[in-house]
Every structure is written in C-alpha cells, then in structure tokens.
Image (cartoon, rainbow, N blue to C red):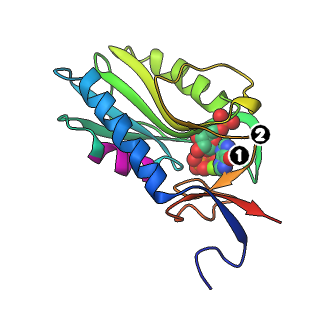
Amino acid sequence: MSRLGGEKVEVLLSEAQLAARIAELGARISADYAGQPLTLVGVLKGSFMFLADLARAIDLPLKVDFIGTTSYQGTKSSGVVRITNDLSRPIDGEHILLVEDIVDTGLTMQYLLENLATRHPASVKVCALLEKPARAKVQVPIAYKGFSIPDEFVIGYGLDWDGRFRNLPFLGVVKP
Ligand SMILES: O=P(O)(O)OC[C@H]1O[C@H](OP(=O)(O)OP(=O)(O)O)[C@H](O)[C@@H]1O
Ligand code: HPA
Ligand SMILES: [Mg+2]
C-alpha cells in the first residue's frame, strides 16, 4: 500500500509548483531582511516540510525555532487553540517570521500573534504557504503568502487529515 493508503487524492499543487513559489518567497524574504538578524518560527506540526524548504531558499544567516499548536479534530476547527510545545528560548528584541502551512479560519495565527507580542520581539510577520479566504473568521496580516486556495480540506506537504498524509510531497484533496 502506498502513502495514499488507498484513498483517491487529486493533486492541487504539484511538487514543482510548490518549489517554484517557495523559491520566490525565499528571495523576497532574503531581500527584505538583508542585514537584520532573522528567526524563523515554524508552527508545528503542519509547517515542518514548508519550513525545511523555505529555510533553504533564504540566503541569510537565520535562526530556527518551533512552536506547536493544535485546534483541529479531523477536518473541523474546535475554535480553541492550544500550545502543545513552546519556543525553546525568549525572543525579546528579535525579528520573528512565523512560518505556517495554512491560514484557514485564522484563529491559530491570531492566537499566536497575540501570544508572541507579549514577549516583546522587535517585529513579528507571517509567512503562510496557503490561505483559504472563504473560511476566514478573523483577518490576519500575511506578509508572505504562497497561494490562495479554494474552500476544500487539503492534505500533504505537512498538512494532515487526522494525523495522516503529512508525508505526501505535493498538496492534494481527498476525493470520495
Ligand atoms: O486558521 P486555522 O483554522 O486556525 O487553521 C490553521 C491551523 O490548523 C492546522 O493545525 P492543527 O491545529 O491541525 O495542528 P497540526 O499543525 O499539528 O496539524 C494548520 O497546520 C494551522 O496551524
Ligand atoms: O485544509 C486543511 N487541511 C489540513 N489541515 C488544516 N488545518 C486547517 N485547514 C486545514
Ligand atoms: Mg492539522
């Protein structure tokens, strides 16, 4: 059995499309933060694959840290965001770029922006590979966005459905 586990999955964004866009985002981030110390903060678990590729597309001497959150059961947001793993150290005075796989309702990002602001970083911006505008419950500023996608539950490239499918190298939609 393959990593699709017998499900029918349609490709929404191919490996090549993802790689091309991430190269563009990396070039923009490298130019915008040139001469400034930058810390990427990956939002676990969903961002792990995007962060690994984005970090290699950024030509700066950056640092990497992670914060873990959870709020989804299956394909539904519970509306309650919980931190599962905190940052490994204080971030006061640092330029932080939050790296997220998807901004869907926006509740996770809103929670994180409020939470990190209390730690007095020099700046906090958001880089999200995906945004699903049709489902937004709150508006969050995305400084670096990969793609806007339609209102479908997507899997792969870090994103899960009940914990599975994160290891697909492309972004897909499960078909009935
Ligand atoms: O905009 P929202 O509606 O809040 O949804 C986006 C968040 O939900 C997912 O994480 P999840 O809580 O499923 O945890 P995971 O990253 O471990 O899968 C995703 O990785 C984002 O972090
Ligand atoms: O479409 C999605 N797929 C996987 N995880 C998610 N978390 C929020 N939206 C999604
Ligand atoms: Mg998830």
Which one is nearer the viewer's eye here, 159 or 10? 10
Is the C-beta separation of discs 1 and 2 under 8 Å?
A: yes
Q: Residue 132 appears at what percent x and percent y?
A: 67, 35
In the displayed structure, 111 sits above or below 99; it is above
User: Residue drawn 65% across and 19% down?
Assistant: 139
Q: Secondary structure at mark 1?
A: strand
Which disc is residue 72 wearing?
Answer: 1
Q: Is mark 1 within 8 Å of ligand 1?
A: yes
Which one is nearer the viewer's eye here, 107 or 20? 20
Q: Main secondary structure of the magenta part?
A: helix
- Toward which corner of the image does residue 165 lie, by quadrant? bottom right
Q: Residue 163 appears at what percent x and percent y?
A: 64, 61
Q: The residue under label 2 is which amino acid type?
A: Ser
Q: Residue 70 appears at what percent x and percent y?
A: 62, 43
Q: Is residue 54 magenta?
A: yes
Sort mark 1 into few (<14), some (14-19) or many (20+) by Cα contacts within 10 Å: some
- Toward which corner of the image does residue 34 lie, by quadrant? top left
Q: The residue under label 1 is which amino acid type?
A: Tyr
**Is residue 88 at all visible to an observer of this figure?**
no
Q: Earlier in the sequence, mark 1 or mark 2?
A: 1
In the displayed structure, 124 sits above or below 81; it is above
Residue beneath label 2, please?
A: 78
- Toward which corner of the image does residue 40 lie, by quadrant? top left
Q: Quadrant of ligand 1?
A: top right
Taking the image as shown, residue 18 lies to the left or right of residue 147, namely left
Give the alpha-carbon distance from disc 1 to disc 2, as whole Å: 6 Å
**Region of the chain picked out in magenta, as a range:** 49-56
In this rendering, the count of numbered labels is 2
**Is residue 30 at all visible to an observer of this figure?**
yes
Which disc is residue 44 wearing?
Answer: none
In the displayed structure, 56 sits above or below 87; it is below
Taking the image as shown, residue 7 lies to the left or right of residue 29, namely right
